[in-house]
């Protein structure tokens, strides 16, 4: 190859690389501008681009994000304890002991309550997550933080999943979960209750992780009304978190995508 040909070749190569990086950068900017996606760092951004048919490597995505000044949005998060463990209701043993490994869905459900700030006061969100798939299988909001809230969220989860007897439901020691109302509902469905140790958030870490993601990725930090907060929760859970949010623990798949993948072999085997 002559020197002139070599320089023409290298120039074309550089031009092709620059063109590809510009394409990836534009795609990153588009994803980053979408609601909820601005909290994606380079690992999730890379997998999101791949899912949208854009060929790229993780290092290139990280480089393009850095050069474009795009970072994962880390909104200021707040944590107000919703746990009232100063009661004389029965306390269930900690059956998980921070062992969050499962073999299938409907083996362990986690649940907790968080506050959503509104201009009318706080709205309380109770959610149930399947530990195996990280899918939110039931949730409810209320102006009141009481047993009615957690039972309503539990009932929604039961209607959606219809689990077998022996399912473990793990929560903190809050009075809502220790109430006779909640415990009796578990007993009717032969569900085994488990509770974290006092003041130990790590005993329910995956549930805490969901609320952390919600507070980080949900753009609306202070809602106008209780109804607005409820619509915000519905939008985040049903339109983003369950069907679209990529989880590193699920090999960068969404909860719904993960569950579909594990159900397909079962359907094939039944044919």
Image (cartoon, rainbow, N blue to C red):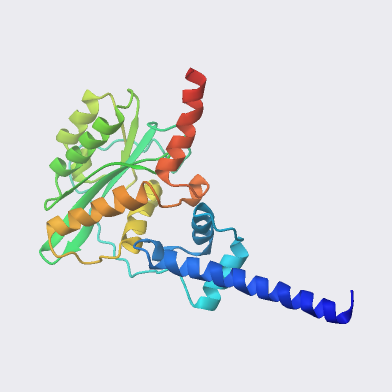
Of the pair 145 and 8, the residue shown nearer to us: 8
Up the image or down, 132 lies above or below 70; here it is above
Q: Residue furthest right?
A: 1
The answer to whether any part of residue 90 appears in the image is: no
Q: Using residue 135 as the reference point, say whether residue 91 is left or right of it.
A: left
Specify the quadrant of the image occupied by residue 89.
top left
Specify the quadrant of the image occupied by residue 117.
bottom left
Residue 144 at what x, y percent from top left?
Answer: 11, 51
Q: Using residue 241 as the reference point, say whether residue 177 is left or right of it.
A: left
Specify the quadrant of the image occupied by residue 220.
bottom left
Total numbered badges shown on the rendered structure: 0
Of the pair 240 and 148, the residue shown nearer to us: 240
Q: Residue at x 40, y 40 (%)?
A: 131
Q: Residue at x 35, y 61 (%)?
A: 36
The answer to whether any part of residue 254 appears in the image is: yes
Up the image or down, 168 lies above or below 212; here it is above
Point out the image quarter for the N terminus.
bottom right
Residue 53 at what x, y percent from top left?
Answer: 53, 54
Up the image or down, 24 lies above or below 194; here it is below
Residue 140 at what x, y percent from top left?
Answer: 20, 45
Q: Residue at x 78, y 74 (%)?
A: 9
Residue 234 at what x, y percent from top left?
Answer: 24, 51
Up the image or down, 36 lies above or below 11; here it is above
């Amino acid at each position: 190859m002559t020197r002139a040909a070599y320089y023409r070749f290298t120039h074309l190569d550089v031009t092709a690389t620059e063109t590809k990086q510009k394409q990836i950068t534009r795609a990153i900017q588009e994803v980053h501008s979408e609601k909820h996606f601005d909290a994606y760092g380079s690992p999730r951004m890379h997998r999101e681009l791949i899912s949208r048919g854009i060929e790229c490597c993780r290092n290139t995505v990280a480089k393009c994000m850095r050069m474009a000044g795009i970072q994962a949005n880390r909104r200021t998060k707040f944590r107000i304890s919703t746990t009232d463990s100063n009661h004389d209701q029965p306390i269930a043993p900690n059956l998980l002991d921070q062992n969050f490994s499962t073999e299938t869905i409907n083996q362990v459900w986690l649940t907790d309550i968080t506050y959503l700030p509104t201009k009318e006061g706080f709205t309380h969100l109770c959610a149930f997550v399947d530990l195996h798939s990280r899918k939110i299988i039931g949730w409810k909001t209320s102006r009141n933080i009481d047993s009615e809230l957690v039972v309503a969220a539990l009932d929604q989860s039961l209607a959606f999943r219809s689990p077998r007897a022996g399912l473990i439901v793990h929560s903190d020691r809050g009075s809502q979960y220790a109430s006779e109302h909640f415990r009796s509902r578990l007993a009717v469905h032969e569900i085994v209750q488990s509770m974290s140790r006092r003041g130990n958030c790590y005993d329910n870490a995956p549930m805490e992780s969901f609320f952390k993601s919600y507070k980080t990725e949900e753009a609306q930090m202070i809602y106008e009304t209780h109804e607005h907060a409820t619509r915000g929760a519905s939008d985040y859970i049903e339109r983003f978190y369950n069907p679209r949010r990529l989880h590193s623990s699920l090999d960068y798949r969404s909860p719904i995508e993960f569950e579909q993948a594990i159900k397909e072999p079962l359907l094939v085997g039944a044919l």
